C-alpha cells in the first residue's frame, strides 16, 4: 500500500468514526462525557494529520514526521479510551461521583486542573449507554485508536517503495 493510500485510509476511518459519533449524539441523543470528547479530539487530530499526509504525500523523513505526529495523537487517545474503559469496569461502589461538564471546567478551571479533573473521570463516564457485540463505545474507540496508531507506526517505519 502506498503512503498516500495509507494516509487516505486513516483519514477516511477517522472521518467515518467522527461522523458516527455525531450521529449518535445528534440523532440518538447520546451526549458525550468529557472523556468521550477527548477521544474525539484524538480522532480529529489523527484525521487531520492523515489528511495532510495524503495531500503532501511525502517520502523518507516527511512520512516519518507525519507517522510520528499521528502516533502521538493516537497514543493520547489510547490513554484516554483505556482510562474510560477502566472506569466503566470499576465496581459500582468505586465509581467517582458525577462532576461538572467540560464546558464549565474549561471556563472555570486552569487548563492543568481541568485536565486532571477530566482524567480522574466522573460517574457519567462510567455509565455504559451503548454496546455492540458486548463492547461499549469507549471500548470500540480503544480498538480503533490502537488500529490507527499501528497504521501510523507502519507509515513511520515501512520502507519506501516505488509509487509511494
Image: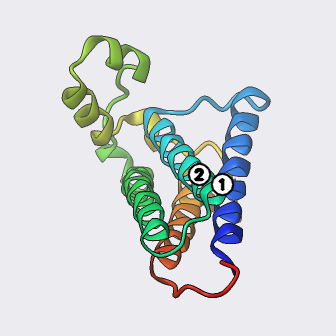
Mark number for residue 55? 1
Using the image as rendered, state which of residue 16 and residue 54 is in the foreground: 54
Q: Which residue is found at the position 31% from the left and 37% from the top?
A: 96
Pick the quarter of the image with the N terminus: bottom right
Q: Residues within 10 Å of mark 1 (few under 14, many from 20)?
A: few
Residue 103 in picture, x, y percent from top left: 42, 17
Where 118 sits versus 144, above or below? Answer: above
- The reply to whether dot 2 and dot 1 touch (C-beta < 8 Å) is yes
Name the secondary structure under disc 1. helix
Please name the residue that numbered disc 2 is placed on: 52
Residue 21 in picture, x, y percent from top left: 67, 41
In the image, is 34 to the left or to the right of 140? left
Using the image as rendered, state which of residue 88 and residue 139 is in the foreground: 139
- Outermost residue to the right: 27
Pick the quarter of the image with the C terminus: bottom right
Residue 155 in picture, x, y percent from top left: 53, 74
Residue 30 in picture, x, y percent from top left: 66, 32
Real-space Cα separation, disc 2 to disc 1, in angstroms: 5 Å
Q: Quadrant of residue 157?
A: bottom left
Q: Count of labels shown? A: 2
Amino acid at each position: 500500500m502506498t503512503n498516500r493510500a495509507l494516509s487516505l485510509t486513516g483519514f477516511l476511518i477517522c472521518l467515518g468514526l467522527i461522523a458516527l459519533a455525531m450521529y449518535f449524539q445528534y440523532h440518538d441523543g447520546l451526549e458525550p462525557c468529557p472523556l468521550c470528547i477527548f477521544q474525539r479530539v484524538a480522532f480529529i487530530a489523527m484525521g487531520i494529520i492523515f489528511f495532510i499526509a495524503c495531500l503532501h504525500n511525502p517520502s523518507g523523513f516527511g512520512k516519518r514526521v507525519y507517522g510520528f505526529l499521528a502516533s502521538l495523537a493516537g497514543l493520547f487517545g489510547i490513554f484516554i479510551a483505556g482510562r474510560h474503559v477502566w472506569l466503566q469496569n470499576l465496581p459500582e461502589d468505586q465509581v467517582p461521583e458525577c462532576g461538572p461538564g467540560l464546558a464549565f471546567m474549561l471556563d472555570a478551571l486552569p487548563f492543568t486542573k481541568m485536565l486532571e479533573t477530566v482524567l480522574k473521570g466522573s460517574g457519567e463516564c462510567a455509565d455504559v449507554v451503548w454496546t455492540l457485540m458486548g463492547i461499549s463505545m469507549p471500548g470500540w474507540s480503544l480498538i480503533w485508536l490502537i488500529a490507527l496508531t499501528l497504521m501510523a507506526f507502519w507509515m513511520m517505519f515501512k520502507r519506501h517503495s516505488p509509487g509511494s
